[in-house]
Amino acid sequence: MKIINKVHQEIIQKLDKLIQDKHNFKERQWVQHYLGSNKPTRCIKTGELQKLSKNYLPDINLINSLYQNGTSFDELVVAANLTGRIESVDINQIDNWLNNAVGWAEVDTLCQSNFTADKVLPIWPGWKKFLIKLSSDKNINKRRASLVLLCKTLGQSNDSRVSDFAFDQIEKLKFEKEVLITKAISWILRQLVKYHPDELAEYLEANRDTLPKIAYREALKKLTTGKKN
């Protein structure tokens, strides 16, 4: 698809100049596989991508172009960096952006840190409805997003509406075997340690035989020692 957004075109040119090693194709292929992405990566350092992103205003048309027309991992990282600087985002736009996010890294760069408690809680009913929709989507990347999008708020707020819903989401997805889901369940369980340790301990005990083994093990470790590993 031809990219018509001029700023998007400029960003691609700058990304090409930042590529770490133009001849090391095997390394870039290995990194792409590790990221779980279906798009090539230039292996640009995170700090460089953040620095580049700060040169641009978080214009919604630019972000839409990067997510919808981006053909590299690096473009989606820039889009995620810009998204984090927007005060409020239409939930439907997040759904559309996730259509082009493949693999844990692309999902997490968008969903992990950009949607903080102060953005989510004032419109919680809408967020809850949206996350329920994502958790039933046939696209596994969206099902992962339905969990990861809760992590930041769980770490910032003791709101029982969010923690109760988190347990419901885990119940809905805990029988899936794919690592994209099992690791996300582990992550969300560990986020519950900060504000809801008693509820988490009770839940782990009651569901130790049905939770993904890695999720149960990592959550119990975090609960009892404060460390993941």
Image (cartoon, rainbow, N blue to C red):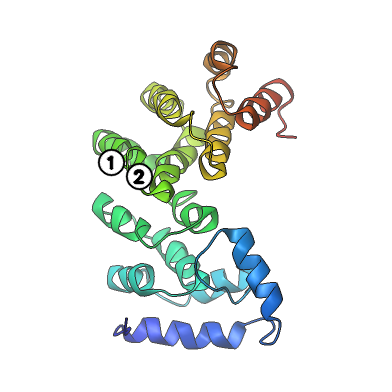
**Residue at 64% across / 72% down in the picture?**
29
* Circle 2 SS class: helix
**Amino acid found under the numbered disc labelled 2:** Lys
Quarter in which the N terminus is drawn: bottom left
As drawn, is 11 to the left or to the right of 41? left
Classify residue 162 by image quadrant. top left
- Residue shown at 33% from the left, 87% from the top: 6
Please tell me how crowded label 1 is: few (under 14), some (14-19), or many (20+) other residues with Cα within 10 Å.
Answer: some
Looking at the image, residue 4 lies above or below residue 39: below
Nearer the observer: mark 1 or 2; the answer is 1
Q: Position of residue 34 (x, y in %)?
A: 64, 59
Vertical position of residue 206 compared to residue 145: above or below: above
Q: Secondary structure at mark 1?
A: helix
Q: Amino acid at mark 1?
A: Phe
Q: x and y percent of residue 76 in the render?
A: 45, 67
Image coords of residue 82 (percent x, y): 42, 65
Q: Nearer the viewer, residue 107 or 103?
A: 103
The residue carrying mark 2 is 119
